[in-house]
């Protein structure tokens, strides 16, 4: 009881003392000014918090998310890269069967898959498209030399799409949607995915305004659960995204909800995204990394 009383007394005393000090500090400048003496020194602004740092594992995870793609690639270069990946993927599958009919069927399926990717190309030139009200409706703007390709992966029961965004025919961003049904019933809340994303890709990945780092691809985790039942991962080149933001500001006059990426890159330059098979394991690798840390 004595100890409790003493602590309470000291806390109250400290509070009272602080009050007296505050009053004295407020009165001092007026008195000093009246006597013509020196003014009270200005209070120093608090030092800004140090920027978070990425671990070697965080940097590696970001680079792996890029896969064989490079920012600045043209649409044709991206398609060529994807075509090569499909060749390798189907070559392995075809090698597993000696049936000529099955092999021929697989070759035709590969051609159809590549054709679907090519036909998915969309230039945003002002005419409304089916993407204007969709999971990516805040990822592009019309009339700013922006365009997109999409690859839809459904293998192994996965419902996963990746979008390639271009500005003036140069890749500057990718957006991957991850179906929440790939997670357990108790893991389909964005707070769970945000924790995993921050752990794998580094601090600030799941912030409303993502933290960007120099020399590595910028990654942003997005919540699309309520409306589309997916988690989102943006991989973007911060410097190129900044240029896109500037072009939009110059050409677009319609008021729209701010994009988190655009807000972030306007404040800081920086930045450098998926192997079809490598990226398809994004969910598994995030969860696996999280379990290791526990």
Image (tube, helix red, strand yellow):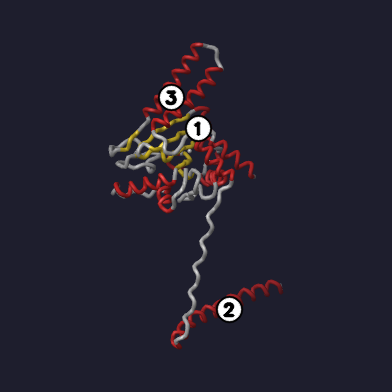
Which residue is disc 2 drawn over? 17
Q: Earlier in the sequence, mark 3 or mark 1?
A: 3
Which residue is disc 3 drawn over? 113
Q: Earlier in the sequence, mark 2 or mark 1?
A: 2
- The quarter of the picture where residue 169 lies is top left
Q: CB under 8 Å between callouts 2 and 1?
A: no
Quadrant location of the C terminus in the rendered image: top right
Rate crowding at label 2 as few (under 14), some (14 to 19) or many (20 or more) other CA atoms within 10 Å: few
Which residue is disc 1 drawn over? 275
Report the residue at 30% width, 49% height from top: 250
Where residue 155 appears, as percent x and y from the top left, is: 50, 27
Q: Earlier in the sequence, mark 3 or mark 2?
A: 2
Where residue 263 appears, as percent x and y from the top left, is: 41, 51
Tag shown at residue 151: none
Disc 3 from disc 1: Cα separation:
16 Å
Label 1 element class: loop
Rendered view: 113 above or below 223: above
Disc 3 from disc 2: Cα separation:
75 Å
Q: Nearer the viewer, mark 3 or mark 2?
A: 3
Judged from this view, the residue extending furthest toward the bottom is: 35
Query: In the image shown, does 110 or 191 lie closer to the viewer?
Result: 110
């Amino acid at each position: 009881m004595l100890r409790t009383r003493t602590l309470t007394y000291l806390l109250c005393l400290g509070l009272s003392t602080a009050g007296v000090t505050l009053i004295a500090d407020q009165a001092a400048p007026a008195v000093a000014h009246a006597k013509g003496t020196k003014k009270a020194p200005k209070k120093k602004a608090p030092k800004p918090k140090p920027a978070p740092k990425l671990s070697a594992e965080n940097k590696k995870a970001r680079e792996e998310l890029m896969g064989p793609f490079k920012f600045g690639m043209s649409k044709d270069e991206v398609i060529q890269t994807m075509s090569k990946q499909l060749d390798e993927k189907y070559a392995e599958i075809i090698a597993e069967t000696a049936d000529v009919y099955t092999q021929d069927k697989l070759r035709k399926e590969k051609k159809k898959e590549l054709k679907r990717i090519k036909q998915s190309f969309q230039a945003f030139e002002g005419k409304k498209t089916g993407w204007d009200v969709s999971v990516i409706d805040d990822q592009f703007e019309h009339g700013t030399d922006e365009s997109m390709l999409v690859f839809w992966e459904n293998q192994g029961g996965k419902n996963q799409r990746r979008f390639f965004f271009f500005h003036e025919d140069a890749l500057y961003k990718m957006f991957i949607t991850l179906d929440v049904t790939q997670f357990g019933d108790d893991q389909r809340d964005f707070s769970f995915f945000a924790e995993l994303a921050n752990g794998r890709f580094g601090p600030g990945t799941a912030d409303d305004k993502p933290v960007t780092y120099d020399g590595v691809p910028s990654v942003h985790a997005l919540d699309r659960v309520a409306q589309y039942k997916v988690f989102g991962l943006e991989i973007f080149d911060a410097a190129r995204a900044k240029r896109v933001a500037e072009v939009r500001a110059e050409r677009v006059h319609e008021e729209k909800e701010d994009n988190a990426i655009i807000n972030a890159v306007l404040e800081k330059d920086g930045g450098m995204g998926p192997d079809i098979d490598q990226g398809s394991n994004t969910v598994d690798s995030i969860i696996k990394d999280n379990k290791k840390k526990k």
